Amino acid sequence: TIGGEFFPRGTLVCPSSEKAHSNRRVKLKKFVSVTHSCVEPPSVLWENLGARRWKKRLAQTVVVTILVFLLLLALIFLPLGRYLLQPYSAVHAAPGFLVQQLQGFIFGLANNILGITMWLQAWGVGFSTWDHLDSFIVIFGVAVSFFNTIFFLFFGLWPELGGFCAAPLGGHGDRGAANVAAAFAAEQLLANTLYDTLVPGWLFSGFLIGQVMGNVWPNVQNLLLLTVVFVCDCLPFNIAKVLTLLIPYNPEPSRKTGRSRITARQAELVFQPKELALAWDYASYIVMPTVSFAFFFVLSPQMWRIFPVMLGWVAFMYLFHRIVTLNISKKQMHASEGLVIYAEFLWGVPLSVIAAAWAFWGYRLGYNEIARIPIAVVASFLMYFGSLLLLGVIQSVHVYGEVDVDYWDVAKRVKFSWFNCNPVHVLKSAYAQESFGGEHVHAPTPFFFGKEYFFNEPSAQERRSQPTSA
């Protein structure tokens, strides 16, 4: 018993001191806490166990994301505003439909560059489980998506922002417009520009651009690079070496022209599909409805047009993920309810925007003060969160009354285990069985989703084993 916790005989521990004495103290660092938030071996990011300085890498993730955003601002959005939007603003006119779609295309491309940066940085933080990584991604992703979406939307609507609250309604928000017809027309122009920016630019084009950049273009790029470096094999070694840095897993070219080879396993790793990333999808599901609800704050008889489009967007997203995404994505274990809990909690944001619109129109019509708007937002969020608690939606799941099943029966059925998912245990089973120091589970084949057929061979199955001599 160590620290009140029982460990079976044969458990290896790390001595806190190298001094030899009979009752020396030992400490055992538990890298993975087996609770409801991590209940399956594939949920563990084994390569990150024992990673240190994760707080430093977390701060680095935030800093790099901000730097990429500033770079996009300098290279894309400032020139876009200077040469594309400012001429319209100077003559108090709105960009045409094609210009607005081009603007939505550029914004979608920039959002995807920022999303790829966030993913690469988040992966390098060193989270020990997929649950922790997904929780960070859904929170950080929603926060960054909200910021850049609102910023880009404000940037794109800059020529027409003078029409916000321009129409006199006899309430607190009136500006005392001399030309009432012109004021109503300015607010109507703002609503039309907002609609043309979102449809189909942000709601559909931006999403499709992300799918092309994330699923189609990487395969095209990798195919071209592999063809040039390993099939044609005509480049000097130094140039080929630089090009392989752009290929996943960086296959090594030969120093002699015409002798570069790539194994079947390396090619398979290069072209393997991405994992099913649910955490990234939640950001779009929360941010896009929130942005669409911005129509509630603009006076227009055409306000209703966005909601049939949103219904079509929901159907489109469902069918796309059901038919396309599930068929081109690699299996991924989401073994906890943590991601769903965070997503359910964040869904209170678009709902609170509706409450804010209710208080906003009361302010414009003179029925209440502007301070009621944040009060309505907080009250809506608390009501929603309280309802989730009462319904038990965001409570941790506890399973009772399970029937104990023999370990070996479960291992044959699900294929994965705490042994064949552990790369160190697999290596020791294959090459250093004597290091176990006693009877152990022999797991010679590592488990990967998509490679379950390896375990159809009897030699790949786990079994009880005695250590052998070197």
Image (tube, rainbow, N blue to C red):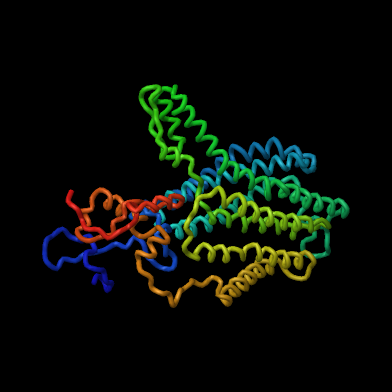
Relative placement, left or right, of 105 versus 53 is right
Task: Report x, y in % for residue 359.
Answer: 72, 67
Above or below residue 33? Residue 260 is: above
Residue 83 x, y percent position in the rendering: 69, 35
Question: In the image, 160: left or right of 251?
Answer: right
Q: Residue at x 36, y 22 (%)?
A: 256
Q: Quarter of the image holding residue 171?
A: bottom right
Which residue is painted at 55% across and 45% down in the image? 114
Work out whether residue 423 can be spotted.
no
Looking at this view, name the residue that lies furthest to the left. Answer: 21
Q: Position of residue 89 (x, y in %)?
A: 75, 42
Front one among 232 and 72: 232
Residue 236 screen position, x and y as percent: 41, 22
Which one is nearer the viewer's eye here, 434 or 168? Answer: 434
Q: Is residue 273 above or below residue 381?
A: above
Relative side of 218 to 80, left or right:
left
Among the 4 quarters of the image, the one containing residue 184: bottom right
Which image quadrant: the N terminus? bottom left
Residue drawn 22% across the image and 58% down it: 466
Q: Nearer the viewer, residue 321 or 102?
A: 321
Residue 198 can be seen, yes or no: yes
The total number of labels drawn is: 0
- 362 with respect to 402 (left or right): right
